[in-house]
Image (cartoon, helix red, strand yellow):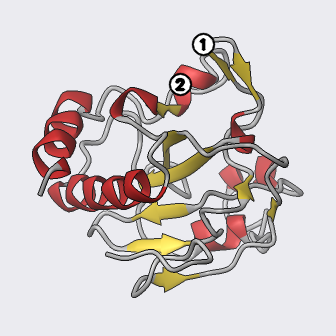
Amino acid sequence: MTLDSTGWLCGVRRVASPNWDERPPGCAIDTLVIHNISLPPGQFGGPHVDELFCNRIDSQAHPAFAKLSGLRVSAHALINRGGQITQYVSFSKRAWHAGESCWQGRKNFNDFSIGIELEGTDRASYTDAQYTALTQLSLVLMTRWPDICPQRIVGHADIAPERKTDPGAAFQWGRFRRELEKNRDL
C-alpha cells in the first residue's frame, strides 16, 4: 500500500467527497481517529456510505436516514467488512469526521487528524480483514506523518465522549495495537 504525493492511496477505490477543506496553516497531522459506520444501522454493504459522504443520500430510502438529511460529513477512508479501502478525501486535507471534539485539552480534531471508518457497529465483531487493512493503512500514515504514534490513535468516543461511542466495545484495541507493533519494524 502506497500513498502518492497528494495524499491519496494508490490502488484503492476512490469516491471523492465534496465535504472537505484545507487544514489550518501550520497545523501538523498527528492523530488518527477510528470510527464505525453502517447504513442503515446494523446493515453492511450497499451504496449508502458513499451516498452520505457525497451528499446524495435519499432521506426517504430508510427511516434512519431522515436525520441525515442535509448533513455534510466525510471521512478520509472506509474499510469495509472484506478489508477493502475506499478513500473519500486526501489525507492531506481536512475531512469532516470528528465534529465537536476535545481530548487531552485539544479541540477541533478535524484540523489535525485523519478519520478512518470501519464498516461496523459498536457491538458487531470487526473482521480479520478489517484489522489487517487498518494496521497496514495506519503504518502507511505513520510513515508519512511521523507525529502519528500508537498513543495518538484514538476512537471517536475518546474525543467526543458525550456524543459518540464508536468504534465501540467490539473493537479490540489490544489486538490492533499488538498488530501495529508487530508490523511496525517490518
In the rendering, at what x and y percent does residue 158 appear?
A: 52, 21
Q: Decide if residue 127 is on the left or right side of residue 85.
A: left
Q: Residue at x 10, y 44 (%)?
A: 182
Location of residue 48 by image quarter:
bottom right
Residue 157 numbered tag: 2
Which of these two is toward me, 3 or 116? 3
Q: Is the residue 127 above or below the residue 26 in the image?
A: below
Location of residue 80 by image quarter:
bottom left
Location of residue 17 by image quarter:
bottom right
Q: Residue at x 78, y 65 (%)?
A: 60
In the rendering, at what x and y percent does residue 144 appear?
A: 46, 59
* Amino acid marked by disc 1: Gln
The local crowd at label 2, few if under 14, some if 14 to 19, many if 20 or more residues have their Cα within 10 Å, is many
Q: Residue at x 62, y 73 (%)?
A: 50
Q: Decide if residue 45 is on the left or right side of residue 95.
A: left
Residue 104 numbered tag: 1
**Residue at the far bottom in the pictured view:** 11
Residue 84 numbered tag: none
* Number of numbered discs on residues: 2
Label 1 sits on a secondary structure element that is loop
Label 2 sits on a secondary structure element that is helix
Q: Is the residue 56 above or below the residue 100 in the image?
A: below
The CA distance from mark 1 to mark 2 is 13 Å
Q: Decide if residue 66 is on the left or right side of residue 81.
A: right
